[in-house]
Amino acid sequence: MYDSALHHIPDDPPVLTWTWITDRALDLRRPPPQTGLDAAAWDAVRHHGGLWVNGHPAAERCDAGSRIQVYAFGASPPALSQVPLKILLDRDGVVAVDKPSGLSTQRTRASAHRCLQAMLIDRLGDPGLRAVHRLDRATSGVVLFARTKAATQALHAQFRGRTVQKRYLAVVAPPPAEDAFEVDAPLARAPTPQDAPAHLVMAVSDAPDAQPSHTRFEVAGRRDDRAVVRALPVTGRTHQI
């Protein structure tokens, strides 16, 4: 039986990035010299959607003064065509899918295709499918998609009203001292070294842009130096667990 908790998508190769302000109009069908990419590598960037101009996915040309961002895989990423997707529900405009670990819910800067939403659109043949919430790449579990505008609005209203109950299970080491506890603290993006991998890291912070976060935790089981912890988020901040 397929179980997303036991199935991990192979990691994508590292992503190379370039950012600059162009002093001239560019034909983006050809690789800009700033990247050093050959024609084949540039075609791969454009295929994946890793070219951005002024914060938006780019077309074929841009004007002088535009901010160019390029995200290129350092090697060919593993194919996703054979990755199984377990659809738990498809009814009344709502689709529930068991997301495997290692797969983004929606597109990334480097690729519009290597995500659960793109895979589901391809396999169900419905270009209108949209995720109404997200799980982190490393997290497996149920993700809800909407087929219609009415379903989207109804689900968003439930998430805004916090009538949706979300539960996460995690194996932690060392085990917590208490069987039940809460973490209620503001979170902000943590500074990372310039040469560190481009991953979002959140940390408890007193920065002005820190957002409130609140999670309840319950120990579901203990063994040796580990514990299974049930996390019940009250707020929905990125990486709060």
Image (cartoon, grey):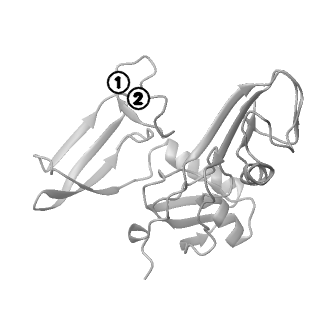
Give the label, 2 or 1, closer to the camera: 2
Residue that carries the numbered disc 2 in the rendered image:
190
Residue pictured at 67% horizontal, 60% vertical: 118
Q: What amino acid is found at the position of numbered circle 1 in the picture? A: Ser
Distance Cα–Cα, label 2 vs label 1? 8 Å
Q: Position of residue 159 (x, y in %)?
A: 50, 47
Q: Nearer the viewer, residue 71 or 187?
A: 71
Kindly state the secondary structure of the residue where label 1 is placed. Answer: loop
The vertical placement of 32 against 22, above or below, is below
The one nearer the camera, 193 or 103, is: 193
**Residue 26 placed where, x, y %?**
88, 32
- Element on which disc 2 rests: loop
Mark on residue 205? Answer: 1
- Is there CB contact under 8 Å for labels 2 and 1? yes
Amino acid residing under circle 2: Ala
Numbered circles on residues, count:
2
